[in-house]
Image (cartoon, coloured by chain):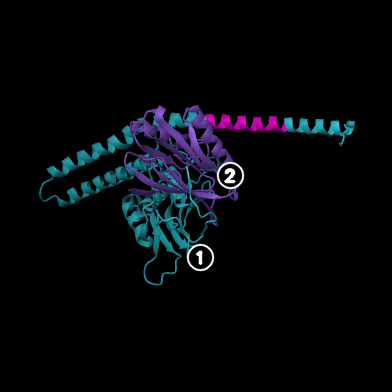
Amino acid sequence: MKKLFLYPAALYAEKEATEIVTILGSCVSVCLCDNVLNTGGINHFMLPLWNGQGLASPRYGNIAIEKLLEKMLYLGSDIKNIKAKVFGGAEVLETETINFNIGKRNIELAFNTLVELKIPVISSSVGGKFGRKILFFSDTGEVRLKYVGKTNLNSNT
Amino acid sequence: MSEIKITDELLLNELTKRFDEKEKAINELKSITDELKEVNAKLTASEQLKSHFIANINNEIINPFASVLGLSRSILEVKENDWEKAKYMARLIFVEAHNLDFQLKNIFAAAEIEAGRIYPQISNVDIANLIKGVLEDFENDFKSKKLTPEIINNVNIEQGKFIFHTDPEKLKLILSNLISNAIKFSKGAKVVITFSQQENSTLVISVRDFGIGISEHNKEIIFDRFTRIDTGINSLNRGHGLGLSVVKAFLELFGGDIKIESKIGEGSLFTIFVPIPDEITDIDGYSSEGNEVFFMDETELF
């Protein structure tokens, strides 16, 4: 199976069955899976909302979720068959005041956006004090998760 | 059974507490509303700039293409012994083509970033050589503004070469943008490029120009997409206002940073910090880096 490490601010959704690994601190990943077409996709966002600064990239939750769904629909999924899983958003050591409660805000944004889009969240593991390493199988939608206490886990993951 | 006594004092305290909380909530709401207004204004501006961008493409892409086509046709018609003339026109073609290539690279980089499709492609990079290559690409621009590039190497090189582990294509585009800006806004006689390494780790490259400088307000917005400081119709400077937003996004991908020091009328100093990338070699292994402490042996399934 194709393997991929998903960097922060990136997103991935392709027809090909892929094993995707990503490491989450205060960042959040939303996995979307379609068990009819057996396809899935995942994003990894760092901040909840794009504030008009820099590029409109999936570094920001509102853009990351919208773009991931767009990609799934482009690959032929029916929105009725799409289900979501949400991970991450841990409280990691805050270095900057602007990142205050960033994990919590990322989680809220993810759940609120998915409610608005009427995509059911079938499982999640969010918050807490530890980072997560997740392995996502895009064909089955299965997620394997391990908690990591990473010494240099920072606001970039 | 214990009895709860309600005294006046307790009641008053509770009331004051609740009033304070309410006031706090109102203040918070106010600041959030202000923030929202600001973002809204920014997004409206961004949308306008986007339409401006599309209109700009005509100037920035179609016109250079037309001159490349015209010039190559002229070269084809040059008489056999008029070698110098052909060389002159070939140089003009090179300048236009290099400029187009640079603009398109920025546009595609921005599009890839916005699509969430960028990954670092790390290899061993000879930094001095990479900087030299970028400067060679801009040789004509340096000449036409009568500028001299100056490279200061602050790295202790023992084996002749300074090799750094990074993504060469992305670093090249970052430097091209910084150098292109330095040339554009320069009024002095030189552009100084310095590179060094912090304690055998982070690569630090700075580009200094002696130009018009950047105001405090502009420092805040230059990394936003489609922002051009110099947008007048008579502007001699070309570009789409994507360069620095690409620079910033690439540095974020690297886990790096950029700093600006600038004074109006005196010039600007852009410094980039590129850390050594984390080794992400093992994807299927579940205990890769040594600095991860697993405290749960079992994997949870979702």
Q: Tell me if I can see residue B237 in this picture.
A: no
- Chain coloured cyan in the rendered structure: B
Label ID, residue B199: 1
Marks 1 and 2 in Cβ contact (< 8 Å): no
Which is nearer the eye, A108 or B74? Answer: A108
Which is nearer the eye, A134 or B193? Answer: A134
Label ID, residue A99: 2
Instruction: State how far apart marks 1 and 2 are (Cα).
Output: 28 Å
Give the residue furthest to the front: B1
Q: Position of residue B98 (x, y in %)?
A: 29, 47
Rendered view: B39 above or below B160: above
Q: Is residue B26 magenta?
A: yes
Q: Chain of mark 2?
A: A
Whether residue A15 sits left or right of residue B93 in the image: it is: right
Give the overall secondary structure of the magenta segment.
Answer: helix
Q: Tag 1, which secondary structure? A: loop
- Give the mark toward the camera: 1 or 2: 2
- Chain coloured purple in the rendered structure: A
Q: Position of residue B79 (x, y in %)?
A: 11, 46
Rendered view: B16 above or below A134: above
Q: Chain of mark 1?
A: B
Q: Position of residue A87 (x, y in %)?
A: 50, 42
Which region shows up in magenta?
B23-40
Label ID, residue B54: none
Which is nearer the eye, A139 or B137? Answer: A139
Say few, some or many: other residues with alpha carbon within 10 Å of mark 2 (under 14 / 14 to 19 / 20 or more): some
Three-letter amino acid code of the residue under disc 1: Glu
Residue at image coords 33%, 37%? B60
Say few, some or many: other residues with alpha carbon within 10 Å of mark 1 (under 14 / 14 to 19 / 20 or more): few
